[in-house]
Amino acid sequence: MRPAIILSLSSVLFKSYFRAGRRSRLSFLSQPRNLLVVDIIALAIPLVLLQIVLPYLPEEMVVSMEPMVGQVLVGLPMFFTSAIIVAGILFELGQGSGLSSSEAVNWLPISPREYVLASAISVIGAYSLFFAISVGVTLPLSLKFGLMHVWPIAVILSALALLLGGFIIEALKAAMNRVSSTVYRTSGRFGIVSRLLLMTIFFVMIQLAFNPYILYSTLGIMASGVDLFWVIPMIWPSVAVANLIRLEGLLAVTFFALSIAFVFLIFMVASNLRLKYWSPLPVLIVIKSSAEYVPHTPSLSRFGFSPLAAEIALKEFRALVRRKDLSRYLAVPIVFVIAFLLPTLYMPADYSGFSSGFFLPAMMPLVITMMFSTSSVGQEGKAVINLLMLPITTKEFIQGKLLPTWIISTIATVGAVVGLQILAPRGILPTMVMILAGILVIMVVGFIGLGAGSRYPDFTGGRRNRYLTFEGFLVIFVRGGVSTLAIFAPIFLYQMSSSVPIPTLGLTPTLLATITIGSTLTYFAYRYCKSSVENFLTNLEA
Amino acid sequence: MVLEIIKVESVSKSFGAVKAVRDLNLVVKAGEISGLLGPNGSGKSTTMKIIMGILKPDSGMVNVSGVDVKERPVDARRMIGYVPETPYLYEYLTAAEYLDFVGVAYGIEPEVRKQRVEELLQALQMDGHVNEIMSGFSQGMKQKIALTAALLHKPKVLILDEPLNGLDPRSARIVKELLHRLAKEDVAILFSTHVLEIVEAICRRVTIMNEGLVLAEGSVQELRSMAGLNGSSLEDVFLKLTGGEDTAKIVEALKL
C-alpha cells in the first residue's frame, strides 16, 4: 500500500463530498486546512465552556453526572460506528451503477485495499466535526470525574470505531453491488420489488439496532458490569473502555487488541469484496418478456389529472421503486413511526399519549413531505433535460411531481395518527382534526418543498448526492417548520387546555382556526411554488 | 416564399464573466438542414438551448415558427424535436415507458404512437429492446432512443446536438438519409457536429461559431471562398476561420 496514493485519493473523495453542487456553501471545508481549523474550534468551544461551568454546578448534580460520564465514554466508540453506518446507508449506498462503473478510480492503478482505506478516511474526515465536539466535551468531564486514565483510550478507540464504520460501509457497498446485479439479472420486475423490500427491511433493522433507546438500555447493562454484549465484535471497542473504567486491565487490553484485529479483519473483507464486486454490473433488465411495444395510457388521468401530469407522477413512482438511491426513502416513514413510538413505550403512562399524540402527527407530514418534495427536482440529475425539452406546463409539472409526495405522506400521516389513536386513544373527533391538520401541512410543505427544490436543486450525481443545496434546505426547514407550527398551534392549545390550566379552546374553534391558517398558508405556498417552477422550466441556469 | 422557421435576432448570453453567445443572428428556413460548427465551448449548445427555451437569453429575440420562445416556451417546444449533446435518459425506465412519457407529453394518441415507435425503432434496429430497462443500454442505444423520442411527434423543427454520437455506421447512414427526407418534407433542421464530412454531405447552410460569435455563415462553397481556400476541405476552412490551422506545429512541439 502506498500512503501517498491513499492520502491523495482520500482527499479527492473528501472534496467530492463538500464540493457537490455548484453553489455549495460548504465547499470551503473541502480544504483539509480549513476543516482542521473548524475542528479545532469545535473542540475548543465545549472544552472551554465546560471548564468554566463545571465548578459552579450544584453538588447533587455533579454526583448524578458521574455515572453518566462513564457511560458516555463507553458509548462513544459504539456511537461513532453506528453513526457512520447510518450515514453510509443514507448517503453512500445509493450510488447508481452507471456512475460507479465510470468512476476514474476504476481504471487508475489503485488497489482495492488502497481504495477502501482512502474511502474510509474520507468518510472520517467528513464527520470529523462530530468527533472533535465529542473530544471537547469528554475531556473536561473526564478531568472532573477522575477518568483521565480512560479518556485517551476512549478517544483512540472512538477513532478506530469510526474507521470500523467506514470499512463496514465499504463492505456493504461491494456486497450490495453484487446483490443488486444478481437480483436484477435473474428476475426483472420481481427483482425490483424484492430489492426494495430487502432494502426497507435492512434499513429498518439498522435503525432499530441503533435506536438511542435501545442503545441506552444496552449501555446501562454494560456499564453496570454485565458484559452480555461482548459477543458482538462491533462493540468490542466499547467493551474495552467499560473494562478500563472497572480497572479490569487484562480484559481492557484483550478487548483493545481484539478491536484492532476486528477492524483489520473488516478492512480485509471490504478490500476483498471490492476486488471481486468493485462495481454493479450494468445488466440488461427485461421488464416484459414480449419485445412488442404496447402503448400505455396512464390510469391516474381518470381521476382528473391531465395525462401528462399522470405520466410524470407514474415516472416518479417508478423512480422511487427502481432507483437504489431513492428507494431508501420509502423506508423512512416506517422508521419514523418506530423512532417516535418506541419512546412512548418507555415513558410513564401519564405522558405516553401526550408527547407522541402531538409530535408524531405534526412531524410525520412535515418530515415525509419535506423529504419527497424537496428531492423531486434534484433527483432528476442530468436527465432533467428530458423535462425541460418537453412541452410541460407549470400546472402539469406541479401536479405530476407532487402527486406521489401527497399520496405517500397522506398514507403515512393517516396511518400514524390512526395507530396512535389505537395505542393512546384521544377520541374520534380530535383525531379527525389532527388528520385534517396533517393534510394541510402536507399541502403547504409540499408546495414549499417543490418550490425550494426547483429554485435550489442540486443535480450533482456524485458519490454523496443530496438533491437540494444547503440554501434550499434552510428555506424549506424554516418555512416548512414555521408553517407546521402555525397549522398545529390551535390543536396544541386544545391539547394543552386539557392538561395545563390555560383558557379552554373548544374543538370547533380549533377546527376553524386550523382550516383558516392552513388554507391561507396553502395559498401563499402555492404561489411560491408556481413562480419557482415557472422560472425553473424556462431557465435551467436559474 | 420559403418560411423562416427558426429566427434568432441579436441574442446574447453570459454565464457570469463568460460570454457564451454574443449578438447572435441565425435563420433556419423550412426544408433546410443548417449546420452549426465551432470548437468546444464556442456556444453551440447554449444557442440550441436558448432556441429550445431552456435557457433565457440576456438580450435578443428567438422565434420558432411564429412563436416567441421567451413568451411561450411550451408552445414552441410542441413544434420542436430535440436531441441533446449527451442523451441523459431516465435510465430506470424501459425504452417503452420512456417513449410513452414523451408521447403523452406531445399528446400523441396511443395508436399513432404505436405505429411511429415501431417504425422508428425498427429502422434503428432497436425493436428488440423496447421492454428493457435503459440503464443497461450502450451510448449508441441511448442515442437511438433519444432520436426516436425527438422524431415521435413529427416535429416542424429539429434541433440536433451531435446526434450521430455513438451510432454505428449503418444507423448513422439511416439518420442522415432520414434527415434528407425530413428536409424534403419542409422540416427545419439545426444540426451540430464535429464530423465535418457529414456537414459537407448534408448541410445546405453552415454557421461557424467561436467564443460566442458567428465567424462565418453560408453554403460550404461560400465558406471556402470567404476563407480563400477554394478547392480545400471544410476542415481546412474551419481550422483557418477558428484559428486552429497550426496543428502540425503543436504536435511537433509535444515532447512525447
Image (tube, coloured by chain):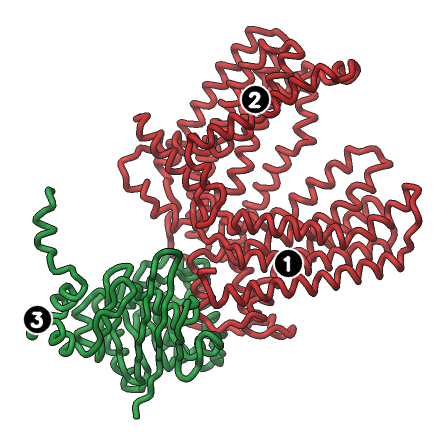
Chain colours: A red, B green
Local crowd size for mark 1, using a 10 Å CA cut-off: few (<14), some (14–19), many (≥20): many
Q: State the image coordinates of residue A459 (x, y, percent, origin top left).
A: 46, 54
Task: Provide the secondary structure element on which disc 2 rests.
Answer: helix
Task: Provide the secondary structure element on which disc 1 rests.
Answer: helix
The residue singled out by tag 2 in the image is: A135
Q: CA distance from mark 2 to mark 3?
A: 73 Å
* Numbered-mark total: 3
Q: Are marks 2 and 1 in contact (CB under 8 Å)?
A: no
The chain containing the residue under callout 2 comes to A
Determine whether A105 is above or below A443 in the image: above
Residue A346 in the figure: left or right of residue A508: left
Comparing labels 3 and 1, the label whose residue is closer to the camera: 3
Q: State the image coordinates of residue B92 (x, y, percent, origin top left).
A: 45, 58
Comparing labels 2 and 1, the label whose residue is closer to the camera: 2
Q: Are marks 2 and 3 in contact (CB under 8 Å)?
A: no
Foreground of the two, B239 or A21: B239
The answer to which quarter of the image holds residue B158 is bottom left
Q: Earlier in the sequence, mark 2 or mark 1?
A: 2
Residue B68 in the figure: left or right of residue A394: left
Determine whether A379 is above or below B227 in the image: above
Foreground of the two, A468 or A190: A468
User: Which amino acid does the dot numbered 2 rest on?
Assistant: Val
The residue singled out by tag 1 in the image is: A446
Q: CA distance from mark 2 to mark 1?
A: 40 Å
Most extreme residue toward the bottom is: B1
The chain containing the residue under callout 1 comes to A
The residue singled out by tag 3 in the image is: B232
